[in-house]
Amino acid sequence: MSTISDKPPVALPQELLFQNYTPIPRINLQTVVDNWPEDQVVTWENQVKETIEHNRTVYLHNQEIIDRWLSIFKATGHNPIGSRGGVASWYKEALTALGKPTGIPVSCASDCYSNQTVVLAGQRYDSPMKITGHSPYTLLEVVQKARGIIQHAMETAQKNKTLEARLLGLAPSLNINPSAFSSTSDFLSAISGAAKTRWVESNYPTGTAMDFDGCEYCSEWAVGERRCSCGNRRVSLCVDGDPVIGFHAYPEPH
């Protein structure tokens, strides 16, 4: 005697079949930043866009199938929708048994990150927007910005290393003794300050006339004076730079 389980499954007509969503591979942002070449990043983004568009079409199709099954159930005298708009649990189970996909398809690329946290040059970023500074963003933009942060940190570290070596080399000629300082940073700061003072004394001694564009009544200021030549603006000498890149001085109005 045959049973229900012995009978072959009923083949439903195509117009009543649900479609499945295409999954999107999830990515770890740290892995992408550290290892992926840019062409791989672009390929992944293009695949995500195509998959999202495909899943959007599938979602609309499945909504139509739900409406058709609802009409069928109602036609057989089984209304799964209550008077207050609630859906009967048996109806949900029935749709699942008929092949309705569970869950909601991914709607944007940012939902594809299995881990959005990334550490760049020792600093933790909890989201791609913390890296780019704005939203929306593309994965390629995030990767380029992240690698730019790493590159900048490496260049800054190298510059600081070069500056430190230069300052240590200047210490003897400036008669600065490291034993007089409680920390290396204070020692280096003192060397930098002394080097700047020596440069100013050599290049802009007191009384040196400088062009000044911060006053509407005159155009000159003398180093050491508190005001420009007409007395209208207060002025001081501002010095930028360091012993490695060189110093640059200019009159600054107040």
Image (cartoon, rainbow, N blue to C red):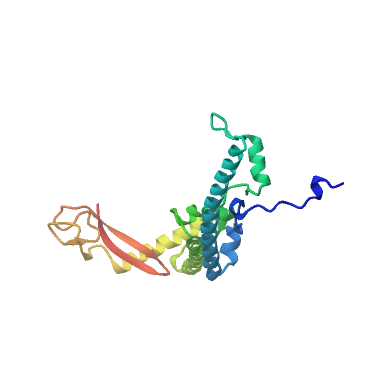
Which residue reaches farthest right?
1
Residue 193 location, x and y as percent? 40, 60
Left or right side of 116 for 148? left
Left or right side of 17 for 45? left
Left or right side of 199 for 15? right
Residue 40: image quadrant is bottom right
Q: Is residue 170 above or below residue 119?
A: below
Residue 182 in view, yes or no: no
Which residue reaches farthest top?
83
Residue 246 location, x and y as percent? 38, 69
Residue 24 in view, yes or no: yes
Which residue reaches farthest left?
217
Q: Between residues 241 and 179, which one lies in front from this camera angle? A: 241
Residue 249 location, x and y as percent? 30, 64
Residue 81: image quadrant is top right
Residue 99 location, x and y as percent? 65, 49
Q: Between residues 93 and 243, which one lies in front from this camera angle? A: 93
Residue that appears at 60% across and 42% down: 72
Q: Between residues 93 and 205, which one lies in front from this camera angle? A: 93
Residue that appears at 54% across and 52% down: 61
Q: Between residues 124 and 191, which one lies in front from this camera angle? A: 124
